[in-house]
Amino acid sequence: MARVYVFKRFERFWHWAQALLIITMLLSGFEVHGTYQLLGWDKAVDLHSTAAWALMGLWVLAIFWHFTTGEWRQYIPTAHKMLDVALFYAFGMFRGEHHPYLKTRDRKHNPLQRVAYLGVKLFINPLIWCSGLFYLFYNQLAAAGFSGLALGTVALVHTFAAFLMLLFLIAHVYLGTAGHTPTAHFKAMLTGWDDDVYEESQAAQAK
């Protein structure tokens, strides 16, 4: 089976650090809202705020990396093979079919991933970022020209954005098991090397 080096070292660090911080923020955020009690409200707020600043710093670093390396092009939407990939996720992966998209170093995201990741970067992330900052600096909003904005509205928007991120996280982990083995995609994100199963299937069909 051919193997392709797809994910660079920084990319893997950014991915897993982001995942850890997002999960930390989701868990601490639910405790702040009173969903459960583990750390206590004060410690949950401190942990949530610390993770938020770390995540924003990581996002700034990741944005810089994407633009300086040209990796931002990986998120340009394309309709090429989008229907094939959608049909694979809807039916094909349950029939044991091979993934229809050939992953390479320069085209690491399939068409549906590009749309999903772009939506996270252009909608969910800014929504969480802005509503979180508004929540954190609510007492200074009037001086910044945002008078009349109710705290409850800010909290509702922030919670809505958090649930969108939770839904994305669940779908992301579930579809991560849709490789040629349930752990193939996770191993690729840990090592950087991905199995080129498309080439293997083509070779098998050619025999």
Image: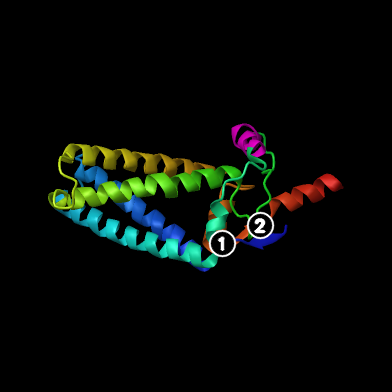
Name the residue: 52% across, 58% down.
72
Q: Which residues are magenta?
A: 83-94
When asked about the image quadrant of residue 1, the answer is bottom right
Looking at marks 1 and 2 on the same chain, the residue that comes earlier in the sequence is marked by: 1
- Please tell me how crowded label 1 is: few (under 14), some (14-19), or many (20+) other residues with Cα within 10 Å: many
Q: Amino acid at mark 2?
A: Thr
Image location of residue 193, percent across then percent down: 61, 62
When asked about the image quadrant of residue 152, the answer is top left
* Residue labelled with disc 1: 7
Q: Amino acid at mark 1?
A: Phe
Q: CA distance from mark 1 to mark 2?
A: 10 Å
In reply to whether residue 85 is colored magenta, the answer given is yes
* Residue labelled with disc 2: 104
In reply to whether residue 180 is colored magenta, the answer given is no
Nearer to the camera, 127 or 207:
127
Q: Is residue 177 visible?
A: no
Name the residue: 78% across, 48% down.
202
Nearer to the camera, 155 or 100:
155
